[in-house]
Amino acid sequence: MTDPGFLLTITFVLYFLGIAAVLWLPEKMTAPALAGFGGLGSLLLLVTGGDALFSSSTFHSTLWAIPGIGDLTISIDYLSAFFLVVTALVALPAVIFAAARIADEQWCHPGYRAALYLGLLIAIPLVVISADVFLFLVAWEVMSILIYLLVNSGHSERPGYLMLAIGEAGTLAVLLAFLLLAGTSGTLSFAELKVSGLSLGPGLRWVIFILSFAGFGVKGGLIPMNFWIPRAYTAAPNAFIPLIAGATLNMGLYGIIRVNTDLLPITQAGPGITMLIIGSVTALIGILYATIEDDFKTLLAHSSIENAGIITAALGAGVLFLATGHRVAAAMALLAALYHLLNHSIFKTLLFMGAGVVEEAAGTRSLDRMGGLLKRMPWTGFFMLVGVLSIAAMPPFNGFVSEWLTLESLLRSTELTSLGIKIAFVVAGVALALTAGLAVTCFVRAFAMGFLGMPRSEAARSTHETRSSALRPMALLALACLAFGVLPTYVIPAVDRVVAPLTGASATRALVPPFFEDSAPVSELPQKFASEFHDLGAQLGHSTMPGRGLAVIHRGGEKNPVVFAMSTSYMFVTLILLLGVCAGVVWLVVVRRRKTVRRPRWDGGVRHLMPEMTYTATGFAQPVRVVFEAILRPQIVDRRETIAKYFRVAIQQERKEIHLVDRLVLHPLAVTAQWIASSLARMHHGQINAYAGYALLVLVLFLVIASTT
Amino acid sequence: MSRWVLKGLQTGIVTTRYPGGEEGAPGISPGIPQDMVCSGSHAEALALRCPTAALQREKDQISVLRERCVHCYRCARGITKPIQWERGFEWARIRSDAVVFPKAFQQSLHIRVIDAGDCGACLHEVKLMNNPFYNMHRLGFFITPTPRKADILLVVGPVTDHMKRAMLKAYEAMPEPRRVMAVGACALSGGVFGPGFVTGSGVGDVLSVDLVIPGCPPPPLAILHGLLTITGRKMALQDDKPAVPGGGT
């Protein structure tokens, strides 16, 4: 094993070399330099993270001792290693994609943008590995500002400002939380905070939880602080958005996990319930707005919010299980959360790449104006299909596995005793089930309206396939989607290494029974249960396959001895076999022996089937819009009637859905701020006499105070 | 609570016994006039009374062109020697060159209905075949919205110019073996509408028709009889009369 410190140094040196290269080399060298240095650095980062994840010791190092503040330390524990792996998995394809696209953005010298991008690649790992409050906050701020600069390098400025403003408010809350945490011990190092966290009172812990949850929730896209996400993701340049969406959203969730499960011991149920409910509500609201959204990138942004909600709900379940002493269930829930976080990063990066490519090719982000892209962009369409199936939680892709694990760990709540917690679990379960259903609708719509059917605009008709340099990273991510989907039994033990220290229990033992092992496969399982699955063939391939098995099989606790079982690996193999057999039979019996007659497509008997006659994205989402009208509250903003002679020949109506969070949070916030400002402005009326009066008043006030004390 | 289960049990089975048994309920069919022999002057008077020229006189012989009859009863009421009316409904005829479906279609036949400009009456009767009394599903007949799965094209209406293309497209989209079924006086001869400036004189102008069902509208049992005939479950009655000469009234 190589020294992680050495690997990290090389990684950061590569990134910094990349920055130097893109800034000083000629413009045409920008893209190769970015792809080369960034790609190599990310690859090394992946090795570092993987190495740390599977090593038995925690890397710890002091960078620099600053007098008066303390030591700047970095450390790679299993949690950090996991997030390093996720970041690197996303960054490797994203940086290649960005290099392919960087010349397309017309803002300033591409070198500056490439430098900012590489800076972000440095800042994200730094957030993850920093082991004291000072370094963490510095890295966090650098990351936030770099994201702001990258988002604002697009055409629109307002979303960037909004993001920066709400982000800084979040950072302030995080800072307060850390100050409260560090206030009692007087140290800034995470290792010592962990010790001092044990002695904090329940009230203070609540305050720290609320502050950190709200502060990190801004970056993590949790309700009600997520209104910047759809705006900023839509405005961000297509070259950068895959990394921003895939890697930086995770940082908010990383913060929540780090503070609330690692630094603070889990003893209360309250934070767990809060996370569970907020998470599931976020997921539901997110997917609801994604389903009715017309803009492809905004749709994906809303879906990011949904996935952040699912992850947070699973985290909350884990925290709740830990607080009530169910360690195995807690390990499963946390594992589901981290697994889903990993999966979401992969497929969201893929989808944002596809959305960028599609926007460039079709000249629009509006799903209503797309259609029929699959014929013209077959590879982009295929990779998007993989991404869409993954995010809609369709087996055998990765989204299915983690959503299955999430819902399954929620089902363990039947073993709990407290009625209130049970009700919270039921509410969350219902919301998440509805979310899963809506997600399928949403992404069937996104793919079908974008890629199938007839082109609904001139631009969509004249698209063509994109460059292979942009397709290769998408292929890589699509492959990852499949790999993390069909091999969950190999991913679960890896993620379990992160979860086990946090919960004190192993989820691997509960989820992946050792069926492959010949000797005593039943030691960890009830005899009858194991033998039944043995008869079913769960041990199939134990002599050829490494690892513990290919099926995720879990047995509920004492109160609900239900067996949950799932194997995407077998499903995948069976699916391919069945499809092959069917295709073979059809070919042998039908195609080969009979004559094929081709007739024109049935179009309902119309003269010409025109794109105007086909379903649009807006029409497809209309049932959802009607069902959830109470939440969406559509407003008619414009209504025009065309009257020819005496008859009304056309009615044009424009309806607008203002986002729930905008309506309930952002708008009142803005109104209050304006009210305060206008109240203060009344004092500034420009009369010099009054200003002199203010000065006199203050003087008198001070004199009074001085005389009384 | 709805009491539909109890009500259903009380009502019992109302479905017609046809084709297993006889169906003689009053009003099940409007009837159709039969050929008659009478004096020449009376035949002349009768033929003149017919608004759709369904009664063709040849000396003292009156022959009925069923394709044209609209059941107006002018030859049965308000005249001294009325024409005899047949009360049945088994009017469906197969054209001489048509072939019934192979045996495999006897238990399941999918129908694509095309409204080629009818007044709504024929369509209504076709719709009635779906109700509990006629219940065509018990006989294995199903309406399908897509011609891709249809075996038989059921056309009602005189085929207006606007529907001609749609009908041909639907026929094109159907897989072999396929049959065309013309239902009602309009689809057979143009009926009271055509041929006119926007309609032809029935389906026969455009497609070769295999099965004809006269009536205006034909009662549902007549259509059922036609479907049973084309699948070979009822003895096929060949249409031996010559094709209708063009020109309506």
Image (tube, rainbow, N blue to C red):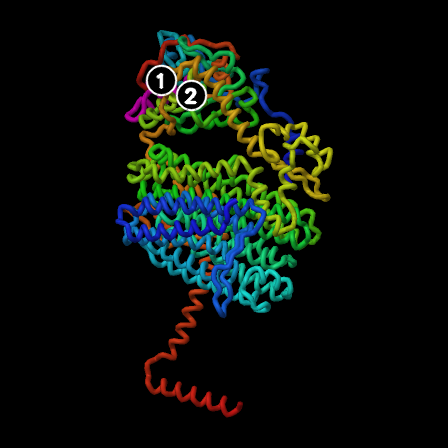
Which mark, residue B153? 2
Contact? badges 2 and 1 (CB < 8 Å): yes
> In terms of depth relative to the viewer, which is nearer, B38 or B126?
B126
- Position in image of residue A540 (x %, y %): 62, 28
On whether residue A56 falls in the magenta region, the answer is no
> In terms of depth relative to the viewer, which is nearer, B53 or A61?
A61
User: Does residue A462 sit above or below A312 in this rendering?
Assistant: above
Q: Within the image, what quadrant is residue A411 found in?
A: top right
- Magenta stretch, residue numbers: B179-207
Callout 2: chain? B
Tell which circle, 2 or 1, labels the residue nearer the N-terminal end.
Answer: 2
Image point 62% across, 29% down: which residue? A542
- Direction from residue A257 to residue B55 in the image, left or right: left
User: Does residue A62 sit above or below A415 in this rendering?
Assistant: below
Disc 2 marks which amino acid?
Leu
Image point 44% across, 56% down: which residue? A227
Q: Is residue B149 visible?
A: yes
- Position in image of residue A207 (x %, y %): 58, 65
Disc 1 marks which amino acid?
Leu
- Secondary structure under tag 2 reads strand
Which mark, residue B207? 1
- Direction from residue A43 to residue A275 in the image, left or right: right
What is the residue that sits farthest to the bottom in this orientation?
Answer: A707
On whether residue B180 falls in the magenta region, the answer is yes
